[in-house]
Amino acid sequence: MNDELKLIAGTANMELGGKIAEYLNVELCKTEIGHFSDGEIKVRIEDNIRGRDVFIIQSTFAPADNLLELLLISDACSRASADRITAVIPYYGYARQDRKDQPRVPISAKLVANLITTAHADRVLALELHAAQIQGFFDIQVDNLFAAPVLFEYIRGMKLKNVTVVSPDVGGIKMGRSFAKRLGASLAIVDKRRTTADKSEVMNIIGEVAGSDIVILDDIISTAGTTSQAAEVLKAAGARKIIAAATHAVFSGQALEKLEQSPIEEVVVTNSIPLRNGSRCGKIKVLDVSPLLGEAIRRIHTGESISILFD
């Protein structure tokens, strides 16, 4: 395996790349990633990857340099005659614009998919895409893993009582229902009205939450506006203990301050995105997804089924 599989980590999340390499018992490829004097990104792969099965680990959260770095590494691998290139994207940025819902806006998720394909990636391994249909934006193979098993094991260990899983919007009902079934919990939905792309107003709660321990489940916490507002309404409705769980900790703007001031007792996220200011909020618990991604990489490399990872 060491003779064939090559693992490259971009600078977006070097720590996660190192943990995946440790799980697979391989060395990360020696790669020079820097900038020219004018700020343009410079990439050079120092290891021989000719004829090898290459996996590039790079999330594409802001700044846009992270996305461009993924494209440049993939192009470099192609020109170095790699046999197969898999883009491992723990967080797929630009996914929230996945349709033309108003005049004169791009479908960013599709454009990014085109760019990754044009940069010679042969397949994509993603974690919790914001919308499942994004898989169809690619003309190459896409495996979309779910972090639910990682989140579930931790939350089950908390031994909550009379649990209700709350979906913060209608789009998360399917994920919420599956998670609630695993926990043997009830399901409730927050009915909200979004006023802008980053702001929403909570309207009411569909379901019973009085006296329950609550798990607010989402794929992304960005500004934390929806999550903190939902927690306030849930608390007012008689909820007892409130936990928030999400795969991707974007934490933009005043997100950490909002979470700190909210009635949420703990915020459970994964390391798909490195915490930039996580130390400022003592409520945050970060779970490691490197075994999940590492096992998927191993199975793709050896030609084994990865369907077991979706259970």
Image (cartoon, grey):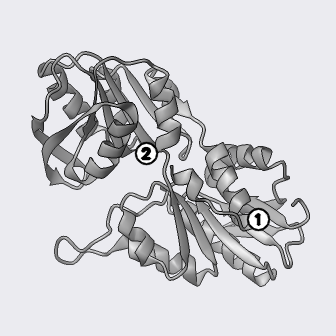
The amino acid marked with disc number 1 is: Thr
The amino acid marked with disc number 2 is: Val
Q: Can residue 255 be seen in this view?
A: yes
Of the image marks 1 and 2, the number of the one nearer the N terminus: 2
Instruction: Kindly give the residue lying farthest to the left in the view shown.
Output: 203
Q: Nearer the viewer, residue 297 or 110?
A: 297
- Pinpoint residue 265: horizontal percent, then vertical percent: 36, 19
- Pinpoint residue 28: horizontal percent, then vertical percent: 81, 55
Count of numbered badges drawn on the protein: 2
The residue depicted at 81 percent of the width and 68 percent of the height is 45
The label nearer to you, 1 versus 2, is 1
The residue depicted at 85 percent of the width and 79 percent of the height is 51
Relative to 98, is 301 on the left or the right? right
Instruction: Please tell me how crowded label 1 is: few (under 14), some (14-19), or many (20+) other residues with Cα within 10 Å.
Output: few
The tag on residue 146 is: none
The residue depicted at 30 percent of the width and 51 percent of the height is 174
Task: In the rendered view, tell whether residue 298 sits above or below residue 184.
Answer: below
- Pinpoint residue 116: horizontal percent, then vertical percent: 55, 75
Question: Dividing the picture into quarters, in which one does residue 59 lie?
Answer: bottom right
Task: In the rendered view, tell whether residue 102 sits above or below residue 260.
Answer: below
Instruction: Please tell me how crowded label 2 is: few (under 14), some (14-19), or many (20+) other residues with Cα within 10 Å.
Output: many
Residue underneath mark 1: 302
Residue underneath mark 2: 250
Helix, strand or loop status at disc 1: helix
Relative to 135, is 197 on the left or the right? left
The residue depicted at 66 percent of the width and 44 percent of the height is 291
Q: Can residue 39 be seen in this view?
A: no
